[in-house]
Image (cartoon, rainbow, N blue to C red):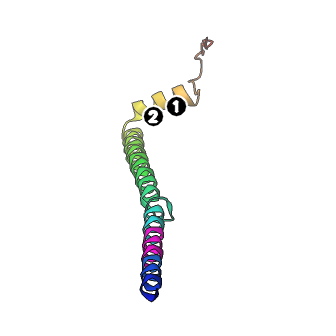
Amino acid sequence: MEKARTAGQTSTRKKFFYLLVAIFLLTTLFTTFFGKKGFLDIQKSRRRYQELQAQIQDLTAQKEKLEAEIKELEKNPAALEKEAREKLWLIKPGEKVIVREKK
């Protein structure tokens, strides 16, 4: 009778141990993927990093273009005059401006 009880207790203890191990593994797996700093969070951060890198490259190219335009305006009086006429609507005395409507 005692052997049956001890065998039953041992079997129950093994089942309980396996249950605890399974719960631990599932919890670890769940937090690995969905927890803070988990796999999905890291992937999301990588995508955001790549987007920001692309934005930095675009802004750097835009900055270089504007710097080149500034240098051109500082060196070339004709370019400066053209820019003033187009963007600031400056005219020389005696000139008339013709404005077209945008459609």
Q: Position of residue 67 (x, y in %)?
A: 39, 45
User: Is disc 2 in contact with disc 1, using a CB cutoff of under 8 Å?
Assistant: yes
Residue that appears at 60% across and 16% down: 97
Q: Nearer the viewer, residue 38 or 97?
A: 38
Q: Give the number of the disc on residue 1.
A: none
> Furthest-front residue in view?
1
Residue tagged 2: 80
Cα gap from disc 2 to disc 1, whole angstroms = 6 Å
Whether 83 is drawn above or below 25: the answer is: above
Residue that appears at 44% across and 59% down: 33
Badge 1: residue crowd in 10 Å (few <14, some 14–19, many ≥20): few
Residue tagged 1: 84
Quarter of the view holding residue 91: top right
Residue that appears at 44% across and 82% down: 4
Q: Element at badge 1? A: helix
Q: Is residue 39 magenta?
A: no
Badge 2: residue crowd in 10 Å (few <14, some 14–19, many ≥20): some
Q: Position of residue 69 (x, y in %)?
A: 40, 39
Quadrant showing the C terminus: top right
Q: Element at badge 2? A: helix
Tell me which amino acid carries mark 1.
Answer: Ala
Q: Nearer the viewer, residue 25 or 84?
A: 25
Tell me which amino acid carries mark 2.
Answer: Leu
Q: Position of residue 16 (x, y in %)?
A: 48, 75
Whether 89 is drawn above or below 60: the answer is: above
Q: Is residue 22 magenta?
A: yes
Q: Position of residue 65 (x, y in %)?
A: 38, 40
